[in-house]
Image (cartoon, rainbow, N blue to C red):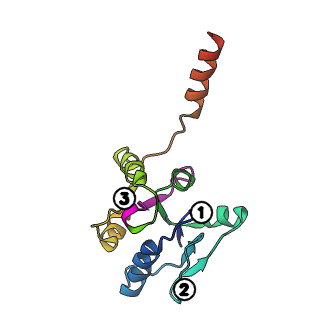
Amino acid sequence: MILVTLGTQDKQFTRLIKLVEDEVSKGNIDDEVIVQAGLTKYKSNKIKIFDFINSDEFDNYMKSADLIITHGGVGSILSGLKRNKKIIVVPRLKKYKEHTNDHQIQICNKFSELGYIKVLNEDDDLGNLLKEIKDFKPKKYVSNTKNIIDTLENYIDNI
């Protein structure tokens, strides 16, 4: 199963759903596709689209997914990484009015550079990336939260 999550942005992201649906039509995706679309409105008879999925159901879909395709939100990326999932990330772009700026490009590029995810940039082909992801071994995610907390506590203790 492939889980596609667009987050809860107040802007449409039909571009990503169309890309996935096109790959289903071409036969490059034969898995069941579940889409958490948020406020993006889209109808399809090829993929299952939900506006919002409650947290328990979403967690179950995350656990069951063989692949996660998501927008470039840090929360969505980390949700997949914490579950050791293969992730394709598509940054929302300002020029398509999918976001107010292009910060998701930098987020995606950094996670990719560190070996955690694959990024589908605007000129890339999703079909090719779907083939490539089969052999991709994502780097295991290790949270840096404890180091940050320790640094802050040390700073506060020494004030």
Secondary structure of residue under mark 1? loop
Determine which of the numbered discs, if any, sits on residue 62 in the image: none
* Residue identified by numbered label 3: 119
In the figure, 40 relative to 98: above or below? Answer: below
* Residue identified by numbered label 1: 8
**Distance between the alpha carbons at the discs numbered 3 and 2:** 25 Å
Q: Earlier in the sequence, mark 3 or mark 1?
A: 1
* Residue identified by numbered label 2: 43
Q: Is residue 38 magenta?
A: no
Query: Hey, what amino acid is under mark 1?
Result: Thr
Q: Is residue 85 magenta?
A: yes
Magenta segment boundaries in residue numbering: 81-95
**Circle 2 residues within 10 Å: few <14, some 14–19, many ≥20:** few
In the figure, 154 relative to 48: above or below? Answer: above
In the image, 90: left or right of 48? left
In the image, 127: left or right of 107? left
